[in-house]
Amino acid sequence: MKRFHLFEFEDYAWFPKNIRDGGTDFLGFVLRLLNYYDPSIEILENLSRETGHSHIIDLCSGGGGPISLIQEKIDGKIGMTFTLTDKFPNLSAYNRLKSNSNEIIDFKEEPLDILNDEIGHDGIRTLFTAIHHFKPREVKGILQITIRDDMPIAIFDGGDKHIGSILAILITHPILFLFCTPFIRPFKWQRLLFTYIIPLIPVYAIWDGIVSILRLHTPKELLAIAHDADQGNKYNWSSGKVKNRIGFNVAFLVGKPRL
């Protein structure tokens, strides 16, 4: 399927924060519920051992769901710590994750635009369900900044770009919103209002979810962008797909400085 870079509501600064946070809270809940990014754990453990970095700087963190799952799964194994960042930080979610993890998960309170702001931390840079928000030239810019800073990077996103994924969103998201919303934490009355009474959160999340499928970069495309960004051949790059426990493909791109 050809890539179409249509608009997503959550990309815009004018979009209401409580509605955006409702969507990122939902996405984080579902990704945790499904253990969607479980295959990333082994990749990150290996990358940590190979590079000597035990801190993860998560970019475009959204609601932080994937990082909270990873933190729980590898807790105590390699002493890994985490910092969440986002252009539109979901601070209520981040504070909860920080508290629940005994501060192993921390966060940057100020907005971070990864194309224009200094990231300001050493460690493995990760992006979960985020790289599709960027056009190829912007992905190249993100990788060039990473190469300049001599930091490892691991990118994970959906790996199933076909009509079946779009139909799955159309069918399952309304059901998940209906039954799961009361269990999403932190609990917010506004979330109930804008899900059940005025369903702005489900409408925007379903639209953005469908557009996300259309925006997905394939592993082959990501690897080509990485090689274009790394003109000095300073990094080892790998890309591909791995299946998670429920049978969905997770696309990845991993880059680490050559020794």
Image (spheres, helix red, strand yellow):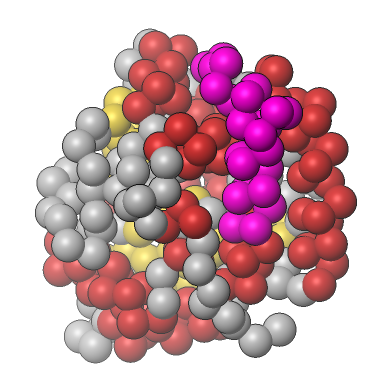
Percent across and percent down for residue 73 are 57, 28
How many numbered marks have been drawn onto this rendered protein structure?
0
Residues drawn in magenta: 186-208
Q: 174 above or below 181?
A: below
Q: 127 above or below 82?
A: below
In which quadrant of the rendered view does residue 26 lie? top right
Percent across and percent down for residue 241 are 65, 66
Identity of the residue drawn at 47% across and 47% down: 44
Q: Nearer the viewer, residue 35 or 52?
A: 35
In which quadrant of the rendered view does residue 225 lie? bottom left
Give left or right: position of 14 versus 34.
left
Give left or right: position of 226 versus 151.
right
Main SS, magenta region, reads helix
Q: 105 above or below 96?
A: below
Identity of the residue drawn at 51% across and 38% down: 19
Percent across and percent down for residue 138 are 32, 75
Give left or right: position of 67 versus 86.
right
Residue 205 within the segment the image draws in magenta: yes
Identity of the residue drawn at 30% across and 26% down: 106
> Can I make out residue 106 in this image?
yes
Q: Nearer the viewer, residue 228 or 169?
A: 169
Q: Nearer the viewer, residue 125 or 173?
A: 173
Identity of the residue drawn at 24% across and 88% down: 231
> Can I make out residue 28 in this image?
no
- Which quadrant is home to the C terminus? bottom left
